[in-house]
Image: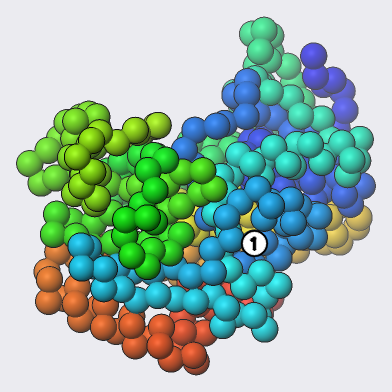
Amino acid sequence: MIRSSVSDRVIVVGAGPVGLTCAALLVRAGIPVLLLEATSERASDLRASTWHPPTLDMIDELGLADSLVARGLVTPTWQVRMHPSGERAVFDLGVLAGETNHPYRLQCEQQVYCELLEERLPTFSKLCTLQRGVTVTGLRQSDSGVVVEAREPDGATVTLQARWLIGADGARSAIREAVGLHLEGSTYPETTILATTQFAFEQHLEGLSNVNYCWSPHGTFSLLRLPNLWRVSLYADADESIEQALTRASIEVKLQRIVPTGRPYDVLEARPYRIHRRIAPTYRAGRVLLAGDAAHLNSPSGGMGMNGGLHDAFNLCEKLVQVWYGADDALLDRYVRQRRPVAQEQIIAQAHQNRTRMQERNSDKRQATLRELQAIASSPERAREHLLKTSMIAGLREAAEIV
C-alpha cells in the first residue's frame, strides 16, 4: 500500500532507464521520490543496447559506468558495409579521446543498466520508494503540487500527492495524455524485425565491427553484437506481409542470405517494431515534466533513443534540484528550450538521415554514399567532426549554450 498523504516529494512515473536515472539523481540530492511502474517486473525483452560516449560520461557521475562496461562489450569502431562484398567505411571512436572519458560505444542491454540502478538506489538514499504494478489513471495539478490517481496491483485506487511529477513512462505515456499533449510527427512505412542469435557472424564475415549497418542486394540489415549474442535487424521483402516476414521460415531465409550455413539458425527471440519520428509540442505542462520516449520517438538507427532520454534525465534533474531548493521554476522552461530542439534537430533528424541512407536501394547511390563515408572516415578531422555529431556530443554542447 502506498502512503497517499505524503506530498513533499517528486513522483516519477516509469521505471525504465530514464525514470530510474531521474530517481537516482533526485535522491542523491536529498529529494524524496516515489517511483511508479505499471509492469510487475523489470522488462527483459529486446530493447536498446547501444551506449554513446557522453552517456557513459554522465552515468559515471552515478558510479555506474565501470559496472556497466564490465557487463557489456566495448566497441571502438562502427561501420557501414556493403554485403556480400565486405566493402566498408569504418569509423574509429578513438579520435574522440580528448573529448570524452569513454571514446567508444558500449554494447549492453538496457535491462542491465536498470538492474544496476535498482541495486544502487538503496545505497544512494532511503528516500526512494519503487512501487511496481501501479497504473496511473489520471492527474490534476495546482500552483503548489500535483495529485495523481492510480490503481494498485490489487485493483484498489489511491490518490497520491507530490510537488512535481516526471513522466518517463514511454511511447504510450499515460502522463503525456493526461496533460493533453500528443506526439506530433509521422510513422515510417516499414516495420523492423529484430532477431537474436548466438551464431558467430564475426567468424564468417571479415572485418566486422560490433556495430554494422549493411546494404545487401535484398535490401538492408544491421548486425549489433552483445557479449553473448548478435542482434539482427531485418525487413520484410517487397512481396511479404509483416505476418509472413515474422515467421521463423522467413527469418531463416533472411539470415541465410547473410551467412549461408547449410543448417538452421538458432533464433532465440524475434519481435517486430514500428519506427517513428514524433515529438511532444512541449516537455512541460505546469508541474508535470516529460522525458525520454514520453517526449520524443525516433528511428533506432544510430542508437540515439535511449541515450537521448538519459540526456533528458540529467538535464531535467539538474534544474529540478535547483528549483526544489529555491530557484525560480522558470528554470524548467530552459530544460524544454535545451532538450526539445536537440531531439528535433539532432536526434530525430540524424536518426532519419541514418534510416534514409540505409533504405536506399539504388546501387550507384549506395556506392557514392559509401565513398563519401570512406572519405570522412579516412580524414582525422572530418572523422572527428562526424563522430562528435553521431556520438551526440555536438548536440549536448549546442544545447548547453541555450539560455
Q: x, y percentage for residue 121?
A: 82, 39
From the viewer's perspective, tell me whether residue 172 is left or right of residue 167.
left
Q: How many marks?
A: 1
Q: Residues within 10 Å of mark 1 (few under 14, many from 20)?
A: many
Q: Tell which of 23 and 344 is nearer to you.
A: 23
Q: x, y percentage for residue 91?
A: 44, 76
Q: Which SS class for mark 1?
A: helix
Residue 275, can we see it?
Answer: no
From the viewer's perspective, tell me whether residue 285 is left or right of residue 142.
left
Residue picked out by circle 1: 55
Residue shown at 68%/15% (left/top)?
152
From the viewer's perspective, tell me whether residue 141 is left or right of residue 136.
right
From the viewer's perspective, tell me whether residue 154 is left or right of residue 325.
left
Give the answer, above or below, for where 115 lies relative to 319: above
Name the residue type under label 1.
Thr
Q: x, y percentage for residue 187?
A: 31, 48
Q: Quick one: quadrant of the C terminus? A: bottom right
Q: Which quadrant of the figure has residue 164?
A: top right
Q: Tell which of 72 and 158 is nearer to you.
A: 72
Q: Which quadrant of the figure has residue 75?
A: bottom right
Residue shown at 24%/51% (left/top)?
258
Residue shown at 12%/76% (left/top)?
364
Q: x, y percentage for residue 286?
A: 68, 48
Q: Tell which of 115 and 296 is nearer to you.
A: 115
Q: How is the image coloured?
A: rainbow
Residue shown at 64%/36% (left/top)?
14
Give the answer, above or below, for where 167 lies relative to 108: above
